[in-house]
Image (cartoon, rainbow, N blue to C red):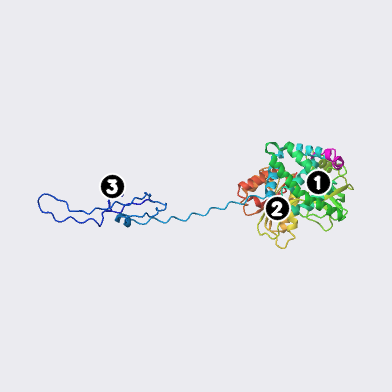
Amino acid sequence: MSAEPLPGDGPADPALAPPPSPLLRPSPTVRPGPRRLATVRPVPAPPTAPMVRPGRHAAPDPVDGPAPSVASVAAPPAPTPPAPAPRASRPAPPTPEADAARRVREAWEEVGPQVDELADWFAALLFSLDPGSRALFPARITEPARRLLRSLVLAMSTVDRPADLAALLEPLVREHRALGLRAGQYETLGVALIGAMRRFGGATWDDAAEHAWVRAFSLAAGPMEDAARAAGNDGAPALAEATVVGHRRVGWDLAVLHVAPDRPVPYRAGQSLTVEIPQRPRMWRTLSPVTAPRPDGLLEFHVRAVEGGWVSRAMVAHTATGDRWRLGPASGRLGLDPRSEREVLMVAGGTGGAPVLALCEDMARWARPRPCTVFLGGRVPDDLVVLDRLRALAEAHPWLAVAPVCEDDPLDPETLPGTLPDAVVRSGDWSSHDVLLSGSPGMIRATAQALLVDGVPLDRIAYDPFTQ
């Protein structure tokens, strides 16, 4: 702010016109004649002091000397400057574990387009360091090597969250045991992994990134080794044998299979199991049971033959009743919290409807199911394999609503037109829902992006991050 002179005070600058002083005597009455000035006592000069412009600055310290002029005394005191605002506290620097986990996630995303080449290089390094590990892989090593890589990176990316890492250890170690890996091989896996990343990391890979990956693997490998040794000492087999008791083709590229394990296979609704079939030994695939765990232990799988898929085509076309399968451990993070009161949105594409149906069947057993809307999508109506069962479940339970989506048949009156992401976004506001996505990686990415743009918080969207 600025100081303005009071009305009648005269010029604001005392150097131009000194203020009136009580030391000046009034002039006596002068008779006509020659003018004579009255005697005037000398007025002392004003004290010398630096000029300070009005505003938020502090006034100068007082200077010894004569009393200030009347104008100086009458002027209002300089305002007290406000106390300086407290400085905002800087956020604490990230911990070494958080920095390592972040760098793992960033570098893994960077090498995503080259993951198959990375997996082949990783396998080649692993075989050169440990020739005996070659027997654990089939002739075509790319896919099992990619699965192994992803399981290691998944553990490494959670070293900054001990609770999440602890929850991952059991299924990851069971899967590694199913592949035939031993606890003593984790060090060799780490050397091969870092060597492969050094080859494919590109411009983002430097000494700091390598140090972070080494730290993350060290933090994850220790608990995995301990869990592998503990699992080996408990005497429980890493695999379960099972018999195919039903095989029914519902299309040229789709089959429904029923498998009876020799012993109960533990899993939760929404999880998947690793499977090996006799037609393709050592070529493990992940399949999601269509139903929640049953008292008789029977498993149902829906398998679609994908282009170039050795295992899926063999399952659809060549599986026969009586075939013996091997089942690995359950894995996956799709699930629902019974304690939450938020409504649920599930979006499933094609055979991704299997874990969604299992989750809905499981929720039907709860005392207080959560309101749930399911969008089930496909290119043609025949792709909606679990639609009839979801509709039957919705008729029996009012908390469930089902919306089928058909991409290539927009005139079908029983389905919504367009792609799954478009149909979901058009149908309502899902920002207050918990969202579960199941299907192909492309569908999951497109739907998650559309929901994020539409206002759904990222922490409300769940899916398996390393879906094949």
The amino acid pointed to by label 1 is: Tyr
Residues at marks 3 and 1 touching, judged by CB atoms closer than 8 Å: no
For numbered disc 1, what is the local secondary structure?
A: helix
Q: Is residue 293 above or below residue 113?
A: below
Q: Position of residue 325 (x, y in %)?
A: 87, 47
Q: Position of residue 38 (x, y in %)?
A: 17, 53
**Residue matched to label 1:** 186
Horizontal side, residue 281 vs residue 41: left or right: right
**How far apart, in angstroms, are the residues tagged by discs 3 and 1?**
90 Å
For numbered disc 3, what is the local secondary structure?
A: loop
1 or 2: mark nearer the eye: 1
**Is residue 423 shown to the viewer in this render?**
yes
**Residue matched to label 3:** 16
Could you tell me what secondary structure mostly forms the magenta stretch? helix
The magenta span reads 127-142
**How far apart, in angstroms, are the residues tagged by discs 3 and 2?**
74 Å
